[in-house]
Amino acid sequence: MAEDAQAPPPNTESSAVSTAAMVIIIVMTITAIRLGRAVVLPVILAVLLSLLLSTPVRALRKLRVPERIGGAIVVFGALAVGIGTVGLLISPAMDWVSSAPTTLQRVESKLRRIVQPIAKLQQTADRMENVTATPSADAPQPVKIATPGIFERVSLSTLEALPSVLSVIFLTYFLLASGPLFRRKLVKVLPGRRDVKHVEHLFDEIEIITSRYLATTTMINTGVGIATALALWAVGVPNFLLWGAVAAVMNFVPYLGPLVTASIIALASLAAFDAPSHALLAPAAFLVIHLVETNFVTPMLLGSRLPVNTVAIFLGLLFFGWVWGIPGAVLAVPLTVVVKVACDHIPALHHLGELLDN
């Protein structure tokens, strides 16, 4: 009895080894996804798009449409809608970009009138600095370096992103066309009958929760874009369709997206109207739309179905934004949901899943 009482717990060493191995795997995974952004990011985006588009493919399958044909209809139909939307917005976007220097100068002049007392103090300080400065005859002349224009940079960025875009499109189609076959093949790679069932359940839950979130969020953000465009049209802001599209896309980025959208709308409104009171109507209208969406629409449509809390969403925004930049910030919430669901099914990560839980 004394020997049994003094015996150490048998699983202490093995649990420590498992924890250390899990930490090493997590560090290596983070390093891999950060360094392999060019490969990993298109794959992640294609997987999320396949989850978003899996519902219409299943609906077509119930109508006896093969998955290969249904996947092609859904993917290339969505692509046609996207190209049509971009074609509708590209002309006002290019016009605004070409007139951006003039627009910014006009906004600056209006803001200067508003903050004129501060500007006078700055001018006084500049004059005092010029008086105290000693002129030098051998002062070096500033050298201007020619840089490519905005259109050249946009063209180069588009050409660089084209292979990734094509990879996302075709990988999304292949994932939809294969149906559950690829997932079953992936599950069978794992040894052991129990692990196979466990991973199948994990994949099912990730697909259900993530696809529901993506579909609902896309619907909400589309509604925000439409409401913003209508509000700006009523106020009289030019290019209201462009700013509505910006509001819809930026609303995928939590916290920072609406702030950036409000700033852009405020600049566009200041450039369009002379009266400050009239210029404030557009950002005020967007603020009302954002408050209604945040406090009423999103809780009503998502509610408790979003399994992560606000702190976890903000941490996910910081992490994925650090790993992948702007695309990571856009994908932060669905990826945080995937991490939360995976943590719930991995015993070594249960504590992290509890931390992320809503």
Image: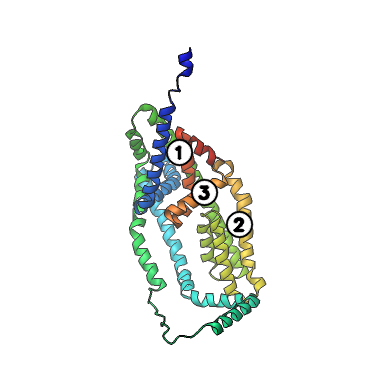
Mark 3 to mark 1 CA distance (whole Å): 17 Å
Residue occupying the point 64% across, 59% down? 288
Residue 290's label in the rendered image is: 2
The mark lying in front, picked from 3 and 1, is 3
Mark 2 to mark 3 CA distance (whole Å): 22 Å
Q: Is residue 33 left or right of residue 291?
A: left
Q: Are marks 2 and 1 in contact (CB under 8 Å)?
A: no
In the image, residue 22 sits, relative to residue 232, either above or below, namely above
Crowd band around label 3 with a 10 angstrom C-alpha radius: few (<14), some (14–19), many (20+): some
The type of residue carrying mark 1 is Ala
Q: Position of residue 194 (x, y in %)?
A: 39, 27
Q: Position of residue 289 (x, y in %)?
A: 62, 58
Residue 36's label in the rendered image is: none
The type of residue carrying mark 3 is Leu
Q: Position of residue 180 (x, y in %)?
A: 37, 38
In the image, residue 7 sits, relative to residue 66, either above or below, namely above
**Judging from the image, what secondary structure is the residue with disc 2 in?**
helix
Q: Which residue is mark 1?
A: 342
Crowd band around label 2 with a 10 angstrom C-alpha radius: few (<14), some (14–19), many (20+): many
Residue 315's label in the rendered image is: 3
Instruction: State the scheme by which the image is colored.
Output: rainbow
Residue 48 versus residue 229: which sits nearer the camera? Answer: 48
Which quadrant of the figure has residue 91?
bottom left
Residue occupying the point 41% across, 58% down? 80
